């Protein structure tokens, strides 16, 4: 499959995608880099000259920086943990013989179609509101004091909301993976004397390894940049300020483009550290 | 120890009865082969014995005790699957150790058995590889190794060689035969390849659509097939079946004659035909002959080289004592 | 011509959209509405105007943005409005807040201050009487007395939600009455002062005693709903809320609401703010004339009458025009006078006890304020929610404010 | 399917699965139910599940207030356009990667994916300026292009994983049969990859439909899709849960219905090469 | 027309030379089989001829004109792939029509050829099915049909039967042979199954690691293998190779004797051994014999049934005129 002819054709056919993405990456990135070395305050006249690394220093030394990195990692990690674990459980459940499997799948897949803004609004107002939310009624019904989700369990709340949105994705990929497990392997393990729990631990789970890495990779890419959920629910208060959100505040609320751009560069670096780390794993998995 | 007895065992999937009630006894130490066309229920029968499927009615005795409701792992049987069903993420060593680990055997005993199995199966150098890094034949041996270490009272094989290429298949066939000779354990072996059945079996069970057509030693089936189905199924190339006048002349509505039971001449004989394709293997010559009355395409096998070619005329004389006669129901007539 | 208007999604604006056809009928100009939630709107119009994006012909902005943008030359001056329009009729407090160096840059659609809304029945039950101009001490006592946890009644509901326009507005206005200020004359942050500590501590104690659960994330909307459902004894918030709580359709307590001026501590400043949602024209729009026509139409006396005719006087956009409060029909509205009094008592130029370098009651009209105040109010909210102590919150507020001011080159 | 599963077991499975499915779906169901309540019933204590006065008033209010049809149409154009454009660009690229892999192929693929990590807020300003420069602010074309670029890596990756499952021999057969590159892609590869392409289309349509940052920030009146529609309901004066629910329902209904109708394709294709 | 000539053709993948420079001429109308163990470069060679890979050096002439840089479609060759490579989304008819569509043939001509091919290949009833609805053998026939309609100057087959089961393989083998007889077009056929090579080829090319070990007719290879490799590769079961004293006694460091060239006796003979596994096929008996000096495992084939079993002692006498002699390099000595 590799004649000279087809190789040059391949290069040609790849060109549009590569050039476009290169442009999409380089042009804004260059502009962001450019701004990041400037004192750029649109509210006060715009470009106020070069400032070297001032913005970078200011951004990391700000008291909000490290907490925001932590918050980002906690949310990403939390959502990944929840979606992968529950995803596995759900995938196994859905793989059991039952009536109306298709219908259940329709129910389970639904959150994936909901706009992040809408789901954040719905959860925040109709479920997690300490006065009118359904959870408050539920807690009161059982005689407990309603949890003030958005203020006292803010990170948990956001993690729950985001997990709800991404659970279908994880479940579906894991379900497809489970269904691809060679039936004979399970039979063999059963013959070998492994009870159901051990069949899961020794056969099913390792089989899912690849799917789990892919779920983690794709979700991480999306989770690193969650924004709407925070914007709508807490507006960054109560320790829910992620790096993305911090940049948003610098750029749009403080109108400090230089500082925000420096933050953007940090975010890109963080994202790429995570990405390289993940892609190592997936990259390896891709050929395997 | 490893006598297996099926009493009126039947199996239905939903409304479809795949195995009608059936009796079968497999003696201890016997090498039994289930053979039959695809979809006839061989695998199902094997899985019923293994306990991987529930039987719909009847009961299964293993070594004289009722095992119908015993879970697979407790039946003392080991199974080798068509796809090998190796655990892809475990090394060969771990694969082989798995059943022992599940049984909670002490580590040194595990190692002892692994080493022994690896030695017997020529796997010692590959113990630390993953199945993905092995060739087909090696994988097959790992699967057998995994079965051996459990020291089961019987082995079940489901078409274990069908994923291997011709040369390897011959080699592995021998290895399994030798294993049987050495272990003298009951083995049940499923295949649809009649050569495997003939060469390996002590006893062949020919199945068709869930029914047992004939049970017997390979040579019994070769010499005395109970019906046309068995006659056609056992022996390669297939037995030639001749109907019509030539058959009537020999005392039956249908007569059968195996390709190797002809006297061939370029000058004279009972029947005359034209050579379609002549296959010269050196050791044998296979002739595919058209134009013989009562049989569209007659296959003839001649030992050694016969210098004939496409389009030549040829004369055949069936060896009278090797003729098989079948009645109009296809049943053997003596 | 078709003009594009960015606006906030509150009731009065939505109502105005309903009358768009009338405008089109009168002038032949079509109107495209971009209605957004307040935070999104602010982010959206700010980006657009600072990059000269030109997406909008009219923007709905507030008292905070107008002077800053006007100073930057980003807005079209509204100094040549027609005779009929009667620009002098605009309440001076409003006109002042929407001008830069004496030039009007945005026409107020409605204006508001804040005041106390309270339940007359509960006040009576508590055996107390609300003065016209209570002190915070009185409020605290009254709140404690009205609180009835059994029946889900909280003595007082106040904003605690993070965001400079939410809890930030309340606490800043409140701090004014406690003698606090954001910056001294050299732009040094003042959160290390006793006045601020008093403000926050008083607020937190008051709310912990008598406020609703989860007040740290309550904003205007949440409090409004609770008050309408009878879950609040008192509520200090925007004067426009008065029309909602007295509206029998949505409010279960419509006929039991009294009004009073926002409280003070005797230092000479009350804790009421001043705000207006106003319409402004970004400089550079191609449709300046049509835009002006619209602004004149929407903020005119005629529009007020149009609404009054169709929806009743209680629902007209308040707080913008003197003439409205001189209208005998409007004077019948129970909260009219109190609203006017509140507005008149707020002075953006001179809002704090100690002198400041900035203009604005519940904000400082400098570009950096929104960013800083959002961060600061988040620290406060975290303290309300008990995630940190008041001292910690103030310390952080102090540090981050000075930090940002330094970054912006004030210090 | 190992042993015949007992009826009880199946009943238990079904009950648990339906229960969990219901729980997961509940927030959406609750939103839909609430959209038919009056505002007072929406926040009633205790909550009312079904026994309320069903009303369409909220929908009427929402429809009266904003031009839903236009938002919907914009959403369809933007999500559809960006997806289709993305596929058109991604198919050749995925073809190259899957069938003429070089040493760099994997790196290029992962690099593409890494462009997705660019934090949108960090580059809002530059992009906004660019849009002004090209005069495409508040235009569908800008969003089509930007969303296409955002999703392109995912599209390429998905297509790549499907294409890799197509045996190269078939394309070689086409080549032997006299097909040029164009015919090969058009007549052989694309039809064979239809399920994969459909699934890619769907997933990216959903992602584009739900994208809320760029669609909100780069539009005003003309090009605003449903994400902007919902942004005008998120917190008006007062807690209008019922109206919010109605607006939410209207914003998600089209994609939800589309998703349900096509979930088979979506699910069967959603593997990202995770399943072999 | 269909003479193919390779001149010093070589192929490297990166640094690895898979095919060293090689000359080969395939005559018009000849049925040439490339045979050799897995990985020896058979497919690569075929693909070089097809034009699916660029050659690294040398040149290829087809019918006397240089085709080295001609794209695959223009070489006038048709290829049948191991996986059939049918277009799954097209009906059988469309599959077969595809090359003609690409060539822009008029519709009625297309139909004529499709009908003809379908009739020849027994596919008429299946023309409207999709490949997924066909059995393996039928798919294979469609692939051949697709090749036929192009009326190519040569057919290239890459292990076309390896995905079929034993019985089908025999049938399809015959069909392809008959096709060749009928069309008399050049065919190049890749396989690693020596039976296919022997039965089908006019000329066999035995490859090892990219080198041509021997070119000749099947019987030439059977009777006069040029070296031990070819000797071992051609013939089934494999030729027995004997080293040591017994070989020296017969005049060479190594002697080879095919399993079918023994006289077998239970009482006396040149060599004595023990039967390991005895495979009784009825038509033949295969004996795997241990303990013969100079050869660990000797395979012997006896016609018909020989009633011996595992463990029996047996005596073998090689037929002197059928002996092969090899020198210490493994090359044939006459
Ligand atoms: N789980 C099942 N549900 C329904 N029918 C089944 C199931 N398993 C097998 N069958 C049917 O039972 C019959 C026998 O299948 P089985 O797998 O035992 O055949 P086989 O003889 O092993 O065939 P092969 O040689 O192809 O492996 C077939 O008709 C098959 O379709
Ligand atoms: N695209 C490639 N890149 C690198 N090496 C290759 C490539 N294709 C084939 N090879 C190598 O070239 C050698 C010959 O491969 P080829 O496929 O021709 O063998 P073959 O004789 O057809 O084997 P088989 O009988 O298994 O099909 C092998 O060692 C193989 O690993
Ligand atoms: Mg089977
Ligand atoms: Mg090959």
Image (cartoon, coloured by chain):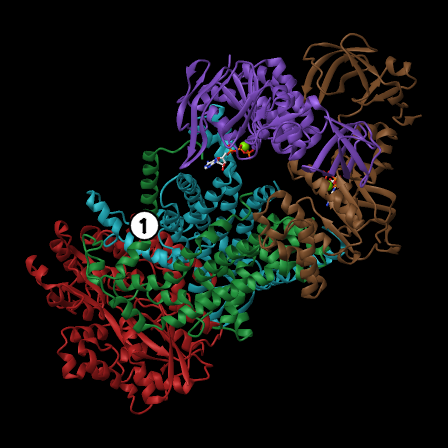
Chain colours: A cyan, B purple, C red, D green, E brown
Task: Identify the residue at image location x=51%, y=12%.
Answer: B1
Relative height, residue C359 to residue D88 (above, below): below
Task: Identify the residue at image location x=81%, y=45%.
Answer: E11
Task: Identify the residue at image location x=78%, y=57%.
Answer: E71
Number of numbered tags placed on the structure image: 1
Residue C117 falls in which quadrant of the image?
Answer: bottom left
* Residue C73 placement, left or right of C139: right
In terms of depth relative to the viewer, which is nearer, A222 or C40?
Answer: A222
For ligand 3, give the image quadrant.
top right
* Residue D46 placement, left or right of E179: left
Give the percent coordinates (x, y) of residue B205. 55, 23
In terms of depth relative to the viewer, which is nearer, B59 or B231?
Answer: B231
Position of the N terminus of chain D by quadrant? top left
Give the letter of the chain under mark 1. Answer: C
In terms of depth relative to the viewer, which is nearer, C28 or B204?
Answer: B204
* Residue E242 placement, left or right of E170: right
Position of the C terminus of chain D by quadrant? top right
* Residue B113 placement, left or right of B210: right
Give the percent coordinates (x, y) of residue D42. 23, 59
Residue C406 seen in the current view: no
Give the percent coordinates (x, y) of residue C228. 18, 62
């Amino acid at each position: 499959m590799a004649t000279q002819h087809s190789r040059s054709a391949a290069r040609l056919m790849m060109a549009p995608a590569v050039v476009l993405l290169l442009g999409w990456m380089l042009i804004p990135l260059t502009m962001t880099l450019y701004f990041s070395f400037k004192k750029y305050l649109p509210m006060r006249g715009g470009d106020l000259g070069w400032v070297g690394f001032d913005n970078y220093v200011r951004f990391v030394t700000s008291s909000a920086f490290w907490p925001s990195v932590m918050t980002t990692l906690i949310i990403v990690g939390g959502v990944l943990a929840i979606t992968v674990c529950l995803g596995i459980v759900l995938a196994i459940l859905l793989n059991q013989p039952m009536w109306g499997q298709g219908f259940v799948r329709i129910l389970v897949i639904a959150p994936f179609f909901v706009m992040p803004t809408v789901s954040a609004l719905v959860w925040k107002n109709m479920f997690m509101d300490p006065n009118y939310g359904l959870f408050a009624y539920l807690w009161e019904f059982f005689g407990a004091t309603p949890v003030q989700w958005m203020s006292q369990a803010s990170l948990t709340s956001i993690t729950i909301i985001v997990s709800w949105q991404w659970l279908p994705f994880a479940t579906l990929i894991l379900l497809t993976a489970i269904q691809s497990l060679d039936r004979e392997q399970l039979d063999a393990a059963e013959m070998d004397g492994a009870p159901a729990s051990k069949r899961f631990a020794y056969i099913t789970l390792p089989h899912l390894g690849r799917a789990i890495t892919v779920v983690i990779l794709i979700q991480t890419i999306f989770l690193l940049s969650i924004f709407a959920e925070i914007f709508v629910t807490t507006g960054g208060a109560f320790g829910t300020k992620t790096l993305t959100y911090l940049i948003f505040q610098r750029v749009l609320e403080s109108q400090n483009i230089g500082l925000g751009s420096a933050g953007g560069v940090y975010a890109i670096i963080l994202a790429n550290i995570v990405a390289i780390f993940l892609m190592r794993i997936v990259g390896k998995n891709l050929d395997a | 120890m490893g006598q297996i007895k099926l009493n009126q065992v039947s199996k239905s999937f939903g409304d479809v009865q795949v195995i009608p009630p059936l009796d079968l006894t497999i003696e201890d130490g016997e090498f039994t082969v289930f053979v039959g066309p695809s979809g006839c229920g061989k695998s199902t029968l094997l899985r019923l014995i293994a306990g991987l499927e529930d039987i719909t009615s009847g009961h299964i005795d293993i070594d004289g005790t009722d095992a119908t409701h015993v879970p697979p792992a407790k039946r003392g049987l080991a199974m080798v699957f068509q796809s090998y069903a190796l655990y892809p993420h475990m090394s060969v060593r771990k694969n082989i150790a798995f059943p022992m680990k599940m049984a909670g055997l002490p580590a040194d005993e595990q190692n002892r058995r692994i080493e022994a199995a690896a030695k017997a199966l020529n796997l010692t150098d590959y113990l630390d590889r993953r199945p993905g890094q092995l060739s087909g034949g090696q994988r097959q041996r790992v699967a057998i190794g995994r079965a051996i270490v459990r020291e089961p009272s019987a082995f079940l094989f489901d078409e274990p060689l069908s994923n291997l290429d011709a040369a390897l298949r011959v080699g592995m066939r021998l290895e399994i035969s030798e294993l049987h000779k050495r272990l003298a354990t009951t083995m049940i072996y499923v295949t649809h390849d009649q050569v495997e059945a003939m060469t390996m079996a002590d006893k062949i069970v020919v199945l068709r659509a869930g029914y047992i057509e004939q049970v017997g030693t390979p040579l019994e089936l070769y010499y005395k097939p109970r019906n046309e189905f068995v006659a056609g199924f056992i022996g390669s190339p297939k037995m030639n079946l001749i109907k019509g006048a030539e058959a009537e002349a020999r005392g039956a509505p249908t007569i059968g004659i195996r390709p190797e039971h002809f006297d061939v001449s370029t000058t004279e004989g009972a029947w005359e035909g034209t050579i379609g394709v002549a296959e010269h293997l050196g050791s044998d010559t296979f002739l595919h002959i058209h134009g013989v009355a009562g049989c569209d395409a007659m296959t003839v096998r001649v030992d050694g080289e016969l210098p004939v070619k496409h389009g030549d005329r040829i004369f055949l004389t069936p060896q009278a004592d090797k003729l098989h006669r079948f009645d109009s129901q296809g049943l053997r007539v003596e | 011509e078709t003009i594009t208007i960015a606006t906030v999604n509150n009731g009065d604006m939505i109502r105005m959209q309903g009358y768009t056809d009338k405008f089109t009928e009168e002038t032949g100009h079509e109107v495209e509405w971009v209605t957004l939630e307040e935070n999104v709107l602010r982010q959206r119009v700010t980006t657009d105007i600072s990059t000269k994006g030109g997406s909008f012909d009219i923007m709905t902005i507030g008292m905070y943005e107008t002077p800053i943008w006007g100073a930057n030359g980003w807005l079209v001056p509204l100094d040549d409005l027609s005779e009929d329009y009667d620009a002098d009729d605009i309440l001076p407090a409003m006109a002042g807040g929407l001008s830069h160096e004496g030039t009007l840059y945005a026409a107020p659609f409605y204006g508001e201050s804040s005041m106390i809304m309270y339940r007359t029945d509960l006040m009576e039950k508590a055996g107390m009487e609300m003065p016209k101009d209570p002190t915070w001490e009185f409020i605290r006592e009254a709140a404690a007395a009205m609180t009835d946890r059994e029946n889900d009644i909280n003595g007082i509901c106040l904003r605690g939600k993070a965001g400079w326009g939410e809890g930030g507005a309340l606490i800043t206005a409140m701090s004014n009455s406690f003698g606090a200020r954001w910056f001294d004359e050299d732009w040094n942050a003042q959160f290390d002062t006793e006045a601020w500590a008093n403000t926050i501590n008083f607020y937190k104690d008051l709310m912990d005693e008598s406020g609703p659960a989860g007040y740290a994330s309550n904003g205007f909307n949440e409090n409004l709903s609770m008050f309408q459902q009878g879950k609040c004894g008192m509520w200090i918030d925007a004067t426009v809320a008065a029309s909602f709580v007295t509206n029998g359709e949505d409010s279960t307590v419509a006929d039991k609401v009294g009004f009073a001026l926002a409280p003070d501590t005797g230092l000479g400043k009350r804790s009421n703010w001043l705000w207006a949602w106003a319409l402004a024209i970004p400089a550079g729009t191609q449709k300046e004339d049509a835009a002006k026509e619209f602004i004149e139409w929407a903020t005119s006396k005629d529009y007020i009458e149009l609404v009054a005719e169709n929806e009743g006087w209680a629902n007209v956009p308040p707080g913008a025009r003197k003439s409205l409060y001189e209208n005998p029909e409007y004077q019948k509205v129970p909260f009219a006078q109190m609203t006017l009094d509140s507005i008149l008592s707020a002075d953006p130029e001179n809002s704090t006890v100690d002198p400041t370098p900035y203009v604005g009651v519940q904000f400082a009209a400098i570009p950096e304020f929104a960013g800083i105040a959002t961060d600061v109010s988040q620290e406060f909210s975290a303290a309300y929610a008990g995630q940190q102590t008041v001292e910690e919150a103030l310390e952080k507020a102090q540090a981050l404010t000075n930090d940002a001011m330094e970054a912006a080159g004030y210090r | 399917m190992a042993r015949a599963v007992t009826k009880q077991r199946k009943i238990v499975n079904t009950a648990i699965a339906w229960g969990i499915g219901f729980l997961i779906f509940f927030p959406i169901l609750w939103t839909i139910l609430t959209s038919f309540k009056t505002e007072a019933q929406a926040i009633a204590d205790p909550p009312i599940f079904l026994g309320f006065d069903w009303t369409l008033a909220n929908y009427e209010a929402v429809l009266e207030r904003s031009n839903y049809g236009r938002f919907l149409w914009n959403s369809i154009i933007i999500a559809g356009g960006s997806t289709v454009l993305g596929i058109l660009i991604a198919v050749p690229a995925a073809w190259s990667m899957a069938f003429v892999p070089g040493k760099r192929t994997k790196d290029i693929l992962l690099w593409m994916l890494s462009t997705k990590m660019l934090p949108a807020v960090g580059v809002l300003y530059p992009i906004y300026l660019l849009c002004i420069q090209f005069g495409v602010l508040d235009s569908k074309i800008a969003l089509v292009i930007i969303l296409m670029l955002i999703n392109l890596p995912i599209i390429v990756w998905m297509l790549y994983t499907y294409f890799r499952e197509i045996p190269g021999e078939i394309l070689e057969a086409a080549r032997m049969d006299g097909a040029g590159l164009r015919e090969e892609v058009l007549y052989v590869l694309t039809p064979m990859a239809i399920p994969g392409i459909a699934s890619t289309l769907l997933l990216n349509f959903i992602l584009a439909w739900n994208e809320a940052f760029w669609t909100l920030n780069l539009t005003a009146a003309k090009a605003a899709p449903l994400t902007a529609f919902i942004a005008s309901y998120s917190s008006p004066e007062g807690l209008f849960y019922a109206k919010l629910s109605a607006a939410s329902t209207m914003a998600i209904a089209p994609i939800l219905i589309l998703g349900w109708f096509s979930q088979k394709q979506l699910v069967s294709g959603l593997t990202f090469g995770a399943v072999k």
